[in-house]
Amino acid sequence: MTLNLNHIAAEFPGAQDKAFLDAACVSLAPRSACSAVNHFLQIALTCPAESSTQHHINMDAMRRQAVQEAAALLNTGRDQIALVESTTHGLNTVAAGLPLPPGSEVLVSEMEFLQVALPWVMQEPRGVRVIPVPHQTGRVLPEDFAAHLSRNTRMIILSSTQWNNGFRADLSAFASLCRRHDLWFVVDAIQQLGAMVTHPEADAVDILMAGGHKWLNAPFGCGILYASPKVLEHMRPPTWGYLNLEDPDGGWGTYFSTPSIQAVRSPGAYPFVASARKLETGGTSNYPGAIGLAASLHLFNELGATTVQEHVLGLTDYLMERLPAVGARLVTPPERQHRSGIVTFRFYQSLEAERALVHQLTQQRVFVSIRFTAGVGGVRVSCHLFNTPDHIDALLDGLRYAARHHGPDFQDNELPGVV
């Protein structure tokens, strides 16, 4: 099955006047998501419900549609899904809710985006140590993590797809390593979910989260957290809110109009949910963000995750086959099973020249970025469902223009991270 490109073009007008190849930074929203947010704002403007109480209940129900759509995309149950503000929020929820004893070690790839390590680095005064694991020419491999295990290792934290070069990890292999050594396996899927098929339950991931503003095309401040049944037994909620409780008989409208209700009870008398919803704030939250996210997720579920992945990998095939002919050197590892929607390359040895190249491309309406970690990176291209080979051709034309007017100045042995 292939994407209906006419349908996608209608959904993403922002991709029609430019070669928008930067979903890994912040993506374009589809019309359906913007329409859903606008519809909600009209409801907020006018309160069309029979009462303000029902108005609030309706908003909560609209928000929960994102949970249903997220569960469908991740091929899991709704009880395993919580809504978070962002990947950062999700990572901090895990760090606060799954405390590690003093002396614990957490393994993190040295190539990671800094946010992946930050919540655990900040626990170092409490005796938690973050151990950076070296990469192999831009590859994040379970055998390298295995070599750094110790009797104090308690957790592996991993981006399923690396933000700097697009390397996609073998989650099942990492999960197997974690199971053998009784470790928690925490996955940041912000650079994967929406572009690549992602099934954390099948891969035996303990916790996975992703903000909505990148490959999920929902830049409204809401994301997804998946938590396995096993980890939920150990997770402490970061906050305590009444919407973390089981819905009362007759619903909250009836409950709040009942004279006998009591606010103060013993801690065990509050009927908190056991599902992932216990990890949410439990109060009035980002309704527009969740509603926009639900609409974007619905689009992915309509198209099918496998269809989107095939389209994305087809575009990266097209790009990677043509980059060498225009003088670019690939940084992204070529193995297809480890590829994602991100392709990174170097065109100049000089970083200043590389930045000038990206500025030139921007002037030509080709949007890309420069990203590095641990010496690995370069010009980063993001190929997503709204992109076509024409967008790739626009990028290649821009590189040919740069080569004609300036010429590449790199030397092979001076390009860190190039494969």
Image: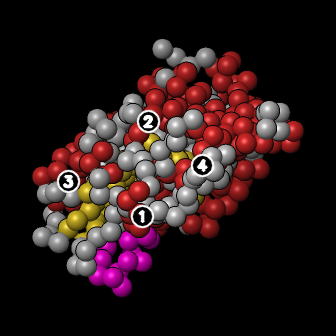
Residue at 49%, 23% (x, y): give it.
304
Residue at 50%, 61% (x, y): give it.
240
Q: Residues within 10 Å of mark 3 (few under 14, many from 20)?
A: many
In this figure, which residue is indicated by the disc labeled 4?
A: 222
Q: Earlier in the sequence, mark 2 or mark 3?
A: 2
**71 relative position to 252: left or right:** left
Q: Which residues are magenta?
A: 118-136
Task: Indicate the colouring scheme.
Answer: secondary structure
Kindly report the distance in space between the C-alpha atoms of the residues bearing marks 3 and 1: 38 Å
State the residue lying farthest toward the top: 1
Under mark 3, the amino acid is Cys
In this figure, which residue is indicated by the disc labeled 2?
A: 78
Please identify, in this view, whether the residue under mark 2 or under mark 1 is nearer the observer: 1
**Which of the pair 77/129 is nearer the observer?**
77
Residue 384 position in % (x across, y down): 56, 35
> Which of the numbered marks, if any, corresponds to residue 178?
3
**397 relative position to 115: left or right:** right
Residue 169 position in % (x across, y down): 32, 47
Q: Earlier in the sequence, mark 3 or mark 4?
A: 3
Residue at 43%, 25% (x, y): give it.
306
Kindly report the distance in space between the C-alpha atoms of the residues bearing marks 2 and 3: 25 Å
